[in-house]
Amino acid sequence: MWNNGRTSLFSMVVCMILAFLVWGCDAKPKQPPSMPPAEVAYIPVESQPLTLTTELPGRTVASLVAEIRPQVSGLLQKRLFVEGADVKAGQVLYLIDPAPFETALRNAKAALAKAEAGLPAIRARVQRFQGLVASRAVSQQDYDDAVSSLRQAEAEVEYWRAQVDTARINLGYTKVIAPISGRIGRSNVTEGALVAAYQPQALAVIQQLSPIYVDVPQSTAELLQLRERLEKGRMKLTEQTRNLVRLRLEDGSSYDETGVFRFQDVTVDQSTGSVILRMEFANKRHVLLPGMFVKAIIEEGVKEDAILVPQQAVTRTPKGEPMVMLVNEQGGVEPRIIAVERPVGDKWHVVSGLKPGDRIVLEGLQRIRPGMPIKPVPFNAQAHGNAQAMPHGNSQAGPPQQGQAGEQPSSRAH
């Protein structure tokens, strides 16, 4: 009976195993649910006029600079100006002790008077000898000596006249005057100091601050690229903005006056490969001071059919080439290599690879691959808000932004 029970139990287990196997063979595997096409937002490519500008760093330079130096030696008696104030041309700045120069002028005048006192007698003697020499009452030698004495006396008179003029000029130099109008800086000497004529150290410096110049260097490579774009007609200059320059200050604010481009230097700095461009700005309120660091924004020209692409839509290939994803006619996506020139605010200026009418994927780049089905929808900036903050935006889209929003830095090949 025990053996029969074991046999029955074994048979039951075998039957249960066979039943599970048969049920497992008859069961069909479950199919995963099909995923809908990925939804992406795109924007159409449009061309538009674009004013291209170059932003160059530079420094301000006073339009006129005069270093005040004494023209005679002497003791400095008075300083007649306020340091840091505006002075006028012809204003007396310093007074040098005039006593030695007044004495020299009187001496020169006395010597001149002495020389002029003997001149009439010598001239009369020559006139008398001139009438007597014909009758041989006076020898020719005596007449020649009289004429020589007259010429010497006249030369001595001229010499002392020049000495009087020199003494008068030196006396005038005791008043050190301002040669130009402008703002004067600190005085390098004090009252009681001994100054020398044409000494190396300036007594003070006057600088004219309005107008004021801005000197900026620009590389010759950028100049050649600009000339090429103008010659090929890819850009044009407008008469309204030709030679106009804007200025950005050290704190990032914009200067309220518009400047004018004056000239381009003709010599290239061999150490930097650049030339100096000079601009002129009005500076009536003296906001700009000489030596201040600024950025000049120079208008290069207008490109009538420029294409701008948001930076978040631009990615990079493993080789570093800029690339965008386009929605093709078949409803899929395909990559497109492009060439960008410069950032313009939060966009890239595209110079090749795109044409008006192309559809660029702006959102959903992380969810798509070339060839996969998608559901393209137009991008609505108002509905989506700021595209750079979208959760589906490509966090690695494009290289880092190099320019400020709304401004155009200098052109560089990326």
Image (spheres, rainbow, N blue to C red):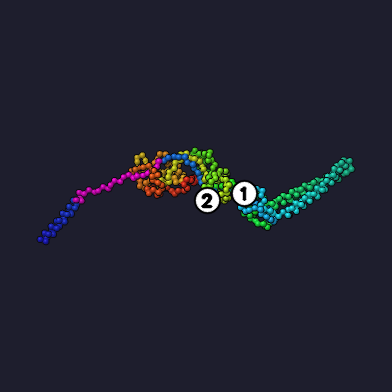
Q: Residues within 10 Å of mark 1 (few under 14, many from 20)?
A: many
Q: Which residue lies furthest to the left in this view?
A: 1
Residue 264 location in percent, x, y?
Answer: 56, 44
Q: What residue type is labelled 2?
A: Glu
The Cα–Cα distance between marks 1 and 2, rounded to whole angstroms, is: 24 Å
* Magenta segment: 23-44
Can residue 375 be seen at all in this image of the molecule?
yes
Which is closer to the viewer, label 1 or label 2?
Answer: 1
**Neighbour class for label 2 at 10 Å: few (<14), some, many (≥20)?**
few
- Of the image marks 1 and 2, the number of the one nearer the N terminus: 1
Could you say whether the residue bearing mark 1 is in a helix, strand or loop?
A: strand
Magenta residue check for 363: no
Q: Can you identify the residue that label 1 sits on?
A: 182
**Picture quarter with the N terminus:** bottom left
The label on residue 134 is none
Give amino acid for label 1.
Gly
Displayed quadrant of residue 362: top left
The question of residue 39 being in magenta is answered with: yes
Residue at screen point 77% across, 52% down: 107
Q: Is residue 30 left or right of residue 411?
A: left
- Identify which residue is drawn at 49% across, 41% down: 51
Report the front residue among 395 and 222. 395
Query: Relative to 37, is 308 on the left or the right?
Result: right
Q: Is residue 148 left or right of residue 294?
A: right
Residue 226 x, y percent position in the rendering:
51, 42
Determine whether 12 is above or below 48 in the image. Answer: below
The image's mark for residue 250 is 2
